Image (cartoon, rainbow, N blue to C red):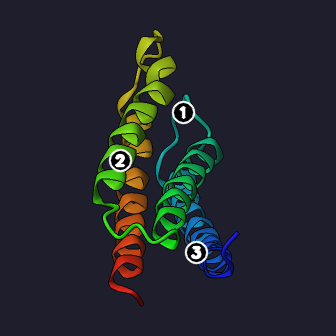
């Protein structure tokens, strides 16, 4: 494998883990002190999902870019669409359940979803700019 790919991937992983831990800590604090209901999904599962999917998408785009493919926009768009489909599949047990209050779980999923998406777009755009 390309050493530049490995270096970028390792650097991104460290930044992603730091981002995930900080966001998880803040989110856990807010849930613990301001919400007293039951949640369908534990927060760690939501953050593990977002972290793994974000890392996989960046890895695919980083790999294609390191091979010399400069037109990775189509790959990014397809992977983002696939990420949305996987997110719906992840939420399907909640959506099909008879759990009484689904809104907090949906918000707990999609707020980090968009934050991770912004993080992903930021680093992919930096990758494509050549930083």
Q: List the residue tagged with mark 2.
A: 80
Pick the quarter of the image with the C terminus.
bottom left
Viewer-nearest residue: 17 or 38: 17
Viewer-nearest residue: 68 or 113: 68
CA gap, disc 2 and disc 3: 18 Å
- Is the Cβ of the residue at disc 1 closer than 8 Å to that at disc 2? no
Give the SS element for disc 1. Answer: loop
Give the SS element for disc 3. Answer: helix
Task: Please name which of the two marks, 1 or 2, marks the residue nearer to the observer.
Answer: 2
State the image coordinates of residue 120 (x, y, percent, origin top left). Answer: 42, 65
Q: Quadrant of residue 68?
A: bottom left
Viewer-nearest residue: 106 or 17: 17
Q: Is residue 71 left or right of residue 5?
A: left
Q: List the residue tagged with mark 1.
A: 39
Q: Determine the residue positioned at 55% across, 31% down.
A: 38
Q: In terms of sequence position, does the residue under pointer 2 or pointer 3 come before the other?
A: 3
State the image coordinates of residue 126 (x, y, percent, origin top left). Answer: 38, 81
CA gap, disc 1 and disc 2: 27 Å
Pick the quarter of the image with the N terminus.
bottom right
């Amino acid at each position: 494998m390309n050493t530049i790919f490995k270096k970028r991937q390792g650097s991104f992983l460290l930044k992603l883990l730091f981002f995930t831990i900080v966001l998880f800590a803040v989110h856990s604090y807010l849930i613990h002190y301001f919400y007293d209901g039951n949640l369908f999904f534990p927060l760690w599962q939501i953050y593990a999902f977002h972290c793994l999917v974000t890392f996989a998408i960046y890895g695919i785009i980083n790999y294609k870019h390191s091979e010399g493919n400069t037109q990775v926009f189509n790959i990014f768009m397809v992977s983002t669409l696939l990420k949305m489909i996987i997110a719906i599949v992840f939420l399907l047990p909640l959506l099909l359940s008879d759990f009484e209050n689904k809104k907090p779980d949906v918000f707990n999923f999609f707020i980090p979803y968009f934050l991770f998406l912004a993080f992903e777009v930021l680093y992919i755009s930096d990758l494509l700019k050549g930083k």
